[in-house]
Image (cartoon, rainbow, N blue to C red):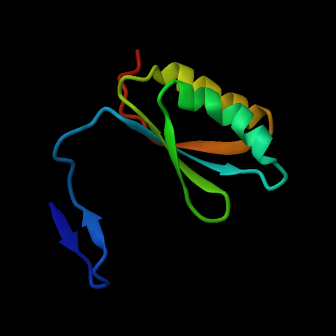
Amino acid sequence: MTIKRGDNLPVVSKLVEPSGRSTYRFIKKNNVSSDDFSKYWLPLEDIGCTYEEGTSGLYSVDVPASTDIHKAYELLELGESSGVWEFEEANCAHTVG
């Protein structure tokens, strides 16, 4: 169900059916070259992750339900520890055990 706010932007009011997909956000460091970014992003892409780029170096990362969430998290941590980005979890919908 979607409710309209006064500014006509949609607002999610409830989850109808969970997808099992997880979402992370990261901000790319200003001094990172596109080659360095690719070096750390491509392994995430290889395991099925995709991203949408926002403004000012902000990214939203989608991790499919079929992707090993532990591997994806490990790769996100590697990019962070290497100084390529800082990341945070937005929603972990994977079953973690």
Tell me if 2 is positioned left or right of 55 in this view: left
Q: Quadrant of residue 37?
A: top right
Q: Residue at x 77, y 32 (%)?
A: 81
Q: Residue furthest right?
A: 31
User: How many numbered marks, from 0 up?
Assistant: 0
Q: Residue furthest bottom?
A: 6
In what quadrant of the picture does the N terminus appear?
bottom left
Where residue 21 sits: x, y (%)?
Answer: 36, 35
Tell me if 14 is positioned left or right of 37 in this view: left
Q: Residue at x 79, y 39 (%)?
A: 36
Q: Residue at x 69, y 44 (%)?
A: 86
Where residue 89 sits: x, y (%)?
Answer: 52, 41
Q: Quadrant of residue 62?
A: top left
Front residue of this view, candidates 18 and 34:
34
Q: Quadrant of residue 35?
A: top right
In what quadrant of the picture does the C terminus appear?
top left
Q: Residue furthest top?
A: 97
Where residue 5 sits: x, y (%)?
Answer: 26, 78
Whether 71 is drawn above or below 50: the answer is: above
Front residue of this view, candidates 31 and 69:
31
